[in-house]
């Protein structure tokens, strides 16, 4: 079953604009991760944010986590055509299921030149 | 540093056949997780191997089985293939057997069942 649900399912923007994707989840987590997948390729890890953290930055990426609302957002600033990809959030569990990541269905981002 | 490699890249099988997919983990990693990704969906966790033992399993039937070798490479075996098994199969390596680490993915094996 899918734990995380990304919103929107698809997003189309112009180069230079910012892109924001949201992720909601249902059960308690110990971390949340964002991944990028180019068409037909494997996933590339972007950022990991732990449950006791509220915000993290990496280059043009900013991730926030609100555990009270069970939600996260990924902001990509000054987008480029090369950012065109699917973006997935994945939740890491605590306790007996701490081995697995549960992925959402993803947001397809298209950045138009 | 050698990344995660998977073989073969593409495979076509017929219903009822058996298939073995292979994954070489990134150097320094002792954990391999396998995922099934249907078209337009997110990856679904199949199982994880940590230090040659199955460390956890998702909601997949027993005809999905695996192995991890002393060099931490891994195999995914699927018996009695069904049409719904058509998907991209991804392996990911990490260190330590928990989800609290970034996972490093290979480019996957595209399995088509006719």
Image (cartoon, coloured by chain):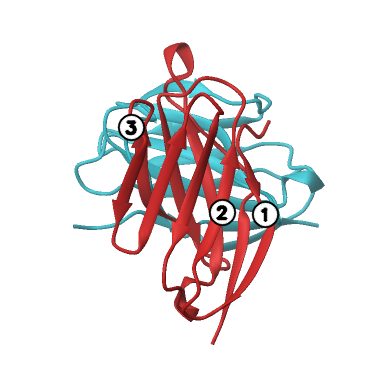
| N-term mark: 3 or 2 | 2
* Residue drawn at x 65%, y 25% as measured from the top left: B59
Residue on which the image places disc 2: A21
* Residue drawn at x 58%, y 42% as measured from the top left: A23
Residue on which the image places disc 1: A8
Q: Secondary structure at mark 1?
A: loop
Query: Distance from label 1 to label 3 (Cα)?
Result: 24 Å
| N-term mark: 1 or 2 | 1
With B111 as the anchor, is B55 left or right in this view? left
Q: Nearer the viewer, residue B9 or A32?
A: A32
Residue B10 x, y percent position in the rendering: 59, 64
Quarter of image, res B65: top right
Q: Which mark is residue B112?
A: none
Residue A5 x, y percent position in the rendering: 65, 41
Q: Are marks 1 and 3 in contact (CB under 8 Å)?
A: no
Q: Are marks 3 and 2 on the same chain?
A: yes
Q: Which mark is residue A53?
A: 3
Residue B85 x, y percent position in the rendering: 72, 45
């Amino acid at each position: 079953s899918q734990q995380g649900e990304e919103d929107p399912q698809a997003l189309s923007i112009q180069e230079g604009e910012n892109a924001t994707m949201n992720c909601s989840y249902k059960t308690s987590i110990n971390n949340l991760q964002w991944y990028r997948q180019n068409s037909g390729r494997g996933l590339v890890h972007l950022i990991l944010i732990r449950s006791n953290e509220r915000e993290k930055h990496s280059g043009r990426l900013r991730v926030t986590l609100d555990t009270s609302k069970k939600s996260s957002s990924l902001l990509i600033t000054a987008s480029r055509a090369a950012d065109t990809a699917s973006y997935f959030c994945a939740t890491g569990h605590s306790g007996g299921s701490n081995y697995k990541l549960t992925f959402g269905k993803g947001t397809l981002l298209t950045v138009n030149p | 540093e050698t990344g995660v490699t998977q073989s073969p890249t593409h495979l076509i099988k017929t219903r009822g056949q058996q298939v073995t997919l292979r994954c070489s983990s990134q150097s320094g990693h002792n954990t391999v997780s396998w995922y099934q990704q249907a078209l337009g969906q997110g990856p679904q966790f199949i199982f994880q191997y940590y230090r040659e033992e199955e460390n956890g399993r998702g909601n997949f039937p027993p005809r999905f089985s695996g192995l991890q070798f002393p060099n931490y490479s891994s195999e995914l075996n699927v018996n009695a293939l069904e049409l719904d098994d058509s998907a991209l199969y991804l392996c990911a390596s990490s260190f330590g057997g928990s989800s609290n680490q970034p996972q490093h993915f290979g480019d996957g094996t595209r399995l088509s069942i006719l």
